[in-house]
Image (cartoon, coloured by chain):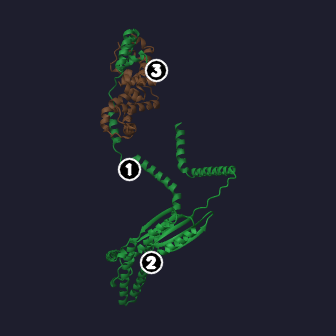
Amino acid sequence: MLGILDRFRAVPAPNWEAVVDQHYDPVWRFCLRQLGPNHADDAAQETFLTAIRRWPTYRGTGELRTWLFGIALNHCRNLRRQHRLTVPFDFLVQQAAALGSDDPNRVVDRGDLTAALGRLSTEHQEVVLLHELEGLTYAEIGALLGIPEGTVKSRLYHALRRLREAPGTTQEVNA
Amino acid sequence: MNAHEQLKAYLDHELSPQERTQVEQSLASSSELREELAQLQRLADALTCLRETPPPTGREGTLRAVRLAARPTPWMQSSKVWRSLAAVGALGLLVVFAITPLAMKSTSMAKSGSVESAVTEVAMAEQPASAMPMDAESASPQPDQARFRTSASGERTQMKAQSNEGIAMRPDVLERSIIRTAVIGVRVSSVPDSVVRVTDLVKSQRGFIEASSTMQEERFRRADMTLRVPSAQFDSVLLALRGLGEVTSESTSGQDVTAQVVDAEARLRVLRTEESSLIEILRRTRRLGEVLAIRDRLSNTRAQIESLDAQRKALREMAALSTINLNLTERPAPVVKTDDGWAIDAWTSAVNGLKEVGRFLGQAVIFLIVFSPIWLLPLGISVWLARRNR
């Protein structure tokens, strides 16, 4: 009963400039990791414009950031489908190398890791992105993808196991 | 969920304290698990390195776009407003289509009523012209409109005040004029006897029977009577009629015409004053053109006096005498039941039932066809949408 009432209760519209100010960076990074540098700006902007249109459907439950990520995720999926893109792990790996944060003693071979990540299923790629790169909790990922937390947990484990078992990564990690 | 699957969640601090303890126990006893945990940790560290991104771009563009989009759209430009207006319009159109056949039926029924009201309206419209004051100087046939209006209304309020005084002094006018009508159906043991009793009753109350008809139906007789009785006796007559037998239906209504009667009287006074002043003017005038104009107006005024007087009399008479429509029916003689053919009875009722069902189905088909503009459109749209989404 209360759920039904909640459905009809409108949350007052926020100051959108302040929202952009506060959330643009995480949303942009999210889009960058999903699409690469060529589409990140467009996707981030489209996310906020969609958020303004869809505001009447926002129930005010959960964090605003998670809601925005949900919209961004949908956009990124659509754009990937539209432009036949893959998750740009090669870009991310290069970026890490360029910024000098990969320690050659510790990290797996970059090319191999990129290849291994690229071989994962889209579902596994998404949980790896959301957890390892975005740093979202299992609960947040579950809310975002619309799946139970337990599923997030096992998906993530299996994704990492695939990575670990992929040729070229195992030796490095084991070394 | 096996111990291996828990390892990743253990690293991520996503386990409950109880699960944590379990995993720690398993780790203590299994070197294989410890090795896997270390691998997972290294892999996670490697992935964490990928978190680095270049600084965000495009923030300004988004801010501009958001500023534009979040500005409340003027309602005239909002597509929502137009969409809802269009929806309301379409709905209204449908309702009009659905109602038109019904409305046409009821207008033909109400036609007589509207003619009556049109007549009174005409009378009202003519009234100010008749109330126009006349003086010798401005006897031109077309006086200017504004002046005519103000003087007419002034005259009229004055006359009303006078008539109100008159009412206060005459109690018989103060009495409200109400046209009372009753329709009553009574089931009696014998219609002819009741007709005689009703006639006597009405006569004793100084009323009369306006119309009466007796009919022989298949198994019983019935009579329709229209009684006119003085308003004061209306209730007692109605009470007596109820005593004739079993009342099957009854409805009474009253229409207060006091205002109309008073108004008619006031207007009559105005017109009579005008009439006498016209006569006075006529007596003094010598010029032929003026005489003709005044005579014309005089006859016009007299015609209006006649019509108003008739109207007032009719109202008074209707109010003075109430109308009762009486329907008398006899209790039907008991039907002698023949018990000779239950099979035939069953057959007949079954056939009748079949006919009913057939008729109903036919009606349903006709309704569906007639209402097709209403259901065909949504159906077409949904089929189209379904095809498009396929």
Q: What shade has chain B been given?
A: green
First reached walking from the N terminus: tag 1 or tag 2: 1
Asked if residue B161 lies left or right of residue A71, the reply is left
Q: Which residue is mark 1?
A: B76
Look at the image and tell me in which quarter the N terminus of chain B lies.
top left
Mark nearest the camera among 1 and 2 is 2
> Where in the figure is residue A33, as x and y percent of width and height?
38, 26
Look at the image and tell me in which quarter the C terminus of chain B lies.
top right
Q: Which residue is mark 2?
A: B310
Q: Amino acid at mark 1?
A: Met
Q: Which residue is mark 3?
A: A119
Element on which disc 3 rests: helix
> Where in the figure is residue A156, as x and y percent of width and height?
41, 21
Q: What shade has chain A been given?
A: brown
The local crowd at label 1, few if under 14, some if 14 to 19, many if 20 or more residues have their Cα within 10 Å, is few
- Asked whether the residues under the numbered discs 1 and 2 touch, taking CB atoms below 8 Å apart as contact, a structural biologist would say no
In this view of the protein, can residue A53 be seen by the observer?
Answer: no
**Farthest-out residue, bottom:** B286
Q: Chain of mark 1?
A: B
Give me the C-alpha separation between circle 3 and circle 1: 53 Å
Q: How many marks?
A: 3
Element on which disc 2 rests: helix
